[in-house]
Amino acid sequence: MAHLRVAIPSVGEGGLDGQRSGHFGHCDVFTCVEAIDGQIVSVTTIQNQEHMQGGCMVPVNLLAEHQVNALIVGGIGMRPLMGFKQVGIDVYHDAERVDIRPVLEDLLAGKLSIISDDQVCGGGGT
Amino acid sequence: MKRTMVHILLAGKEADYFAAFSQQLGKDQRLKVVEVDSAEQSRQIIRDASIDVVVLAEELRDINGLQFVKEIVADNPFINCALVSPLYPQEFHEQTEGLGLFMQLPAHPGAGAAKEMLAFLEKLQQLDKQ
């Protein structure tokens, strides 16, 4: 049984019909979708926490505390990416689409790729 | 997070490069400070000890500071790093973006820079205020 708990950096109140934030570390909320065997069983939000320069591990720790095991980003810096890897959160990449639902559906259908180390942002990832 | 001791590693190729900086840090009993001159020694200490903060000069004996930051971030992303750099802040930001450095330090950082760094670490909540 595949049990996914996916976080999507979101603007405003988030939710399945909301929009993604391009700046993951400074998003308003993380839309958090729980899915079992590809079927969505719950949608909640996690309030992001403010952090200062160098505080890249704040969202890493936040999502790890909420038992997230997958994250979809449009961009991310090297340090938080390595942090997510270290805490066992897979980071998927889609830099094109703004809406949450189609990107999430692609992830659940196995159509999104895990971000590679050479796709990290030259900054601003957090 | 309540911390009893914060372990700080200072690395730079010039002897006494961090002397004034280290002396100031040494006045704070919440800190344990170690100084080395190379990435090789730094790697060993990072492996063997629980290092919380690494402060790098522009040059170490065997690598430049920016290159070593990239290595630390890749292997130990939970370590907070600061780097000495003469670049203008905007250039520094562009060169280090994504590496999550918490501070740019001036060349030959002294007591003032040490105090400033401690204030920053307190804001990062790595160091509890007393």
Image (cartoon, rainbow, N blue to C red):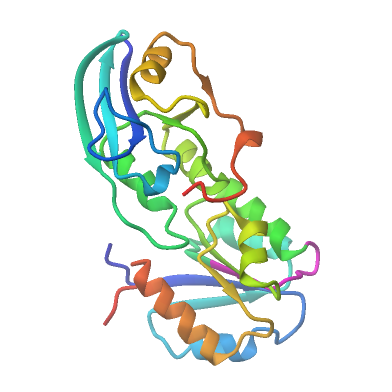
Prevailing secondary structure class for the magenta stretch in the rendered image: loop
For the C terminus of chain B, the quadrant is bottom left
For this rendering, which residue is in front, A96 or B94? Answer: A96
Q: Is residue A78 left or right of residue B86?
A: left
Q: Position of residue B123 (x, y in %)?
A: 35, 71
For the N terminus of chain B, the quadrant is bottom left
Which corner quadrant of the image does residue B121 belong to? bottom left
Q: Is residue B15 left or right of residue A51?
A: right
At x 37% / y 24%, what residue is drawn?
A99
Which corner quadrant of the image does residue A3 belong to? top left
In this view, A103 is above or below A37: below
Residue B5 visible here: no
At x 52% / y 38%, what residue is drawn?
A75
For this rendering, which residue is in front, B110 or A125? Answer: A125
Q: Position of residue B41 (x, y in %)?
A: 69, 64
Q: Position of residue B85 (x, y in %)?
A: 68, 73
Which corner quadrant of the image does residue B94 belong to? bottom right
Residue span colored magenta: B54-63
